[in-house]
Amino acid sequence: MKLENKETLYGIEILRFISAFAILVWHYQHFYFLEKSEFISENQPFYQYLKFFYTYGFQGVNFFWCISGFIFYWKYSSIMKKINAKTFFLLRFARLYPLHLLTLILVAFLQLIYFSNTGNFFLNLNNDLFHFFLQFFMASYWGFEEGHSFNSPIWSISLEILVYFLFYFLVKNFASSNIANILMILICLAMKITYEYNAHAFFDCALFFFVGGFIALNLSIFKKLRYLKILSLLLIIISLIVSLKYELTNINNFTYVFQLFSYPLILLFFFNLQFENDDVKKISNILGNLTYSSYLLHLPTQILVFIIFPKNLISDYAYNNYFFISYMFFVLVISFISYKYFEDPMRVYIRNKIS
């Protein structure tokens, strides 16, 4: 049985990498957290070129959720009737859990070393037995936690797992229903409008996931629009210019609303982006495959850096462009190795067992 659509969307792969890179740049500030002097954001490496990521990089999580919703609806919505719950969730387990478990153990080990050297955990995370078990079951951000713990970036994947259950139920029972999808979007919007910042992050995850899903469900309609890519690009550029010129980003919740408007347009622009050159296709595919690896491997890399090098040297070198390049290069290289020699083989092995 064909379990999913195997076609590679090279434009979407690029977007996946951009969302992960945004988080890498945003979390680069971890290198300054132990510095006694005042942190000056503008002094970070290549700030003039990466200012957007340094400032709004954390929004890459919302973008990733939106991309995930798009991919899930595009891959599974038409064939979910043929897939039972066990198979669907084992497929997700095969992709997500092996690296999660490996990095959880790795971070726990590195944090013990860091604690023995400094008397504190890196980033002051809640690295106790209770939070270890939450992490072990990928439930680190379901509302039982007292804060971030161990390999903390997994929190967004933890929430997405809850959304998988909702996605499976909706698609299994209502197939490719726009009504069910829009209903979920409206419920999440109502929660965000009512509770704003007090609404659980689950509603952010679900909202962006189903917004991405809405685009996938209606691709056939969007494709009929003439000059779709040009119109999408123009709308994104114009909205950015207007937002910056009139400083609309200072308006409460504007950034959040802007994301809900712009992310679908970006998906439409990059969907089915055609590359004639096979090398460009290969590079795009590789970059997309680095997304999950780099997301889970960058924090243990940072802890390792603080264990190996003296704290005062890191504080000095973190502002250096060459240090930034070396760090990013190292994270991407080990991410490539992780995907090629661990994640993908484990995924194939588990999926073969399922089949």
Image (cartoon, helix red, strand yellow):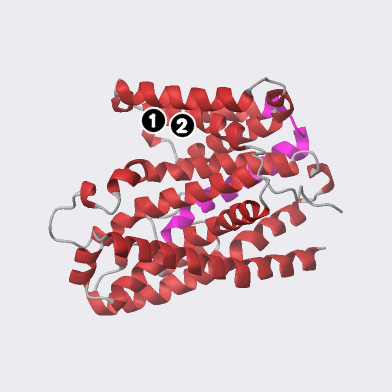
Res 173 → quadrant: top right
Q: CA distance from mark 1 to mark 2?
A: 6 Å
Question: Pointer 2: what residue?
Answer: 259
Quadrant, the C terminus:
bottom right
Res 228 → quadrant: top right
> Is any atom of residue 54 visible in this view?
no
Question: Magenta residues, as a range?
Answer: 151-180
Q: Residue at x 43, y 68 (%)?
A: 330
- Mark 1 near mark 2, Cβ–Cβ under 8 Å? yes
Q: Position of residue 146 (x, y in %)?
A: 37, 55
270 or 167, which is in the foreground?
Answer: 270
Question: Pointer 1: what residue?
Answer: 255
Q: Residues within 10 Å of mark 2 (few under 14, many from 20)?
A: some
Q: Position of residue 51 (x, y in %)?
A: 31, 43
Quadrant, the N terminus:
bottom right
Res 95 → quadrant: bottom right
Residue pushed farthest front? 277
**261 above or below 19?**
above
* Side (left or right) of 211 relative to 74: left
Residue pushed farthest right? 1
Element type at mark 1: helix
- Report the predominant secondary structure element of the magenta stretch: helix
Residue 169 is inside the magenta segment: yes
